[in-house]
Image (tube, rainbow, N blue to C red):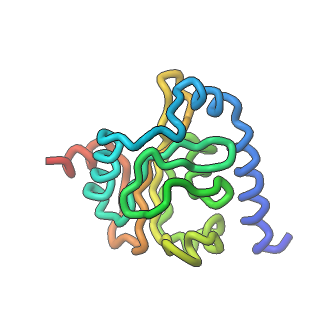
Amino acid sequence: MLVSEVPMQLQQDVFEQVSADVNRLAALRELDILDTPRELAFDRISELIKLIFDVEIGIVSMIDAHRQWYKSVVGLPTSEASLDETFCRYTLQLGRPVIVPDATKDPRFYDNPHVTDGPRIRFYAGAPITTNTGVVIGTICAIDGRVPMKPISFSRSSAATACP
């Protein structure tokens, strides 16, 4: 198998697994949050993501079978992205934070349209949003067009010290 074929197969496997997650889809239906109006509380979270991590884009998103829908987004003019193009599908699949220091060097993302075209993502950090029963329904994301100069983490202590 050629190296260039590995990312495509991995992407397809992750897409199929994430899009078919019946527990997540049922939880989203029960919460009735998809396609609801923006809310100040979620917008504050997106702003805090930008501030704490010094990034251009902060997102609070929910992920259904075909798309990543932004409950709140600061720094992008769109309100959703196709699931097959999102970085967050990997965060959903793993159920833990995913940090990509330079997307141009990551075999999962180097040819992603969000890397090669607008918004030209270089850095991505995403953490899962879970229900009280442990079902991952979405993500919070910190995204930037720059490669960070120092490592970024989602630790509680770093967030606590970044907040005044």
Q: Residue at x 27, y 49 (%)?
A: 158
Q: Nearer the viewer, residue 137 or 123?
A: 137
Q: Position of residue 3 (x, y in %)?
A: 77, 73
Q: Residue at x 43, y 41 (%)?
A: 37
Q: Residue at x 56, y 73 (%)?
A: 115
Residue placed farthest to the left in the image?
164
Q: Tell me where residue 136 sits by quadrant.
A: top right
Left or right: 12, with 145 as reference point: right
Residue placed farthest to the bottom in the image?
116
Left or right: 64, with 99 as reference point: right
Residue placed farthest to the front in the image?
37
Q: Position of residue 63 (x, y in %)?
A: 58, 43
Residue placed farthest to the right in the image?
1
Q: Position of residue 70 (x, y in %)?
A: 48, 49
Q: Nearer the viewer, residue 141 or 61?
A: 61
Q: Is residue 101 above or below residue 84?
A: below
Q: Give the position of the N terminus as an image quadrant.
A: bottom right
Q: Nearer the viewer, residue 32 or 97?
A: 32
Q: Position of residue 121 (x, y in %)?
A: 49, 70
- How many marks overall? 0
Q: Tell me where residue 145 sits by quadrant.
A: bottom left
Q: Residue at x 65, y 33 (%)?
A: 25
